[in-house]
Amino acid sequence: MRINTGSAVRSVALSMDGLRIVSGLMDNTVCIWDVDTGIKVQALEGHSESVQSVAFSYDGSHIVSGSNDKNVRIWDVNTGKSLQTLEGHTKAVMSVAFSSDGSRIVSGSADNTIRIWDTHSGGTLQTIKGHTESVRSVAFSNDGLYIASGSWDCTVRIWDAGTGVNLQTLKGHNSFVLVVAFSHNASQIVSGSADRTACIWDAKTGENLLTLEGHTDWVRSVAFSNDESCIISGSDDKTVCIWDASSGAKLETLEGHSNIILSVAFSSDNSHIVSGSGDQTI
């Protein structure tokens, strides 16, 4: 299925039940789409600049979005209303994610910081500093204990989500780190970089386990399948690649987009992949 969005797609996410896609668009909107029909269910308006990142809560009742307007917003999926505007970042918010229990949100910003927010109050629980350049991607581990971040300073960092302490700094990419994602059991992290590679890391030791080579341009988005057998990556080379997570072998290259691929995601049952592109399609 191809969904025409009318604006470049910066970010996509699937609800856990697989029924809805949320997209963050360059036209400042957050849109919800029906997976079966491709019909737009809701257009959530409130951001004043392009939306860089979107995510569903685990139960699918809420969406979080981060924007170039420096704000994080929490939305009610059923009503489309903006419930909270989280203010504090001093530059664009590049990445957002919910903790699995929905009680916290993590955001990464071009102001070089990471913030952890209380979902209910909208208050800042932690402001984490350590990266020396823009934080392009953040992710919670499924148990909520750890946060991974990727930055233009070419590093991946692992943080204690409770204390904000930097536990590991992973070095190996030769250029900007654009995206990070945890495996389902949080034992591994995959990162994508402007050096055209994706790397798989041991989350505890920081060891670089595998380097996935095959893209011919920046790797903008990565994700593990829930069974941890596969990794997908989206690139400026306009392709999505599927990789064997154990061997690093490329299993398939998916073509069809006519512009850079900015975001990819697996469905929770691993049966489908969704991709968002600068060509204004999902």
Image (spheres, grey):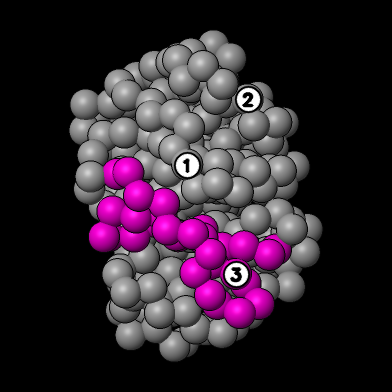
Dot 3: within a 10 Å radius of its alpha carbon, few (fewer than 14), some, or many (20 or more) residues? some
**Disc 3 to disc 1, C-alpha distance:** 18 Å
Q: Which residue is mark 3?
A: 34
The answer to which of 253 and 248 lies nearer the viewer is 253
Q: Which mark is residue 103?
A: 2
Q: Position of residue 224 (x, y in %)?
A: 64, 57
Q: Which residue is mark 1?
A: 81
The answer to which of 16 and 210 lies nearer the viewer is 16
The answer to whether marks 3 and 1 mark residues whose Cβ atoms lie closer than 8 Å is no
**Disc 1 to disc 2, C-alpha distance:** 19 Å
Q: Specify the segment rendered in magenta.
A: 18-47
Does dot 2 land on a helix, a strand or a loop?
loop
Quadrant in the picture for residue 36: bottom right
Q: Position of residue 184 (x, y in %)?
A: 72, 47
In this view, 185 is above or below 248: above
Which is nearer the N-term, disc 3 or disc 1? 3
Q: Is 61 included in the stretch rendered in magenta?
A: no
Q: Position of residue 186 (x, y in %)?
A: 69, 39
Residue at x 34% of width, y 55% of height: 29
Which is nearer the N-term, disc 1 or disc 2? 1
**Disc 3 to disc 2, C-alpha distance:** 26 Å
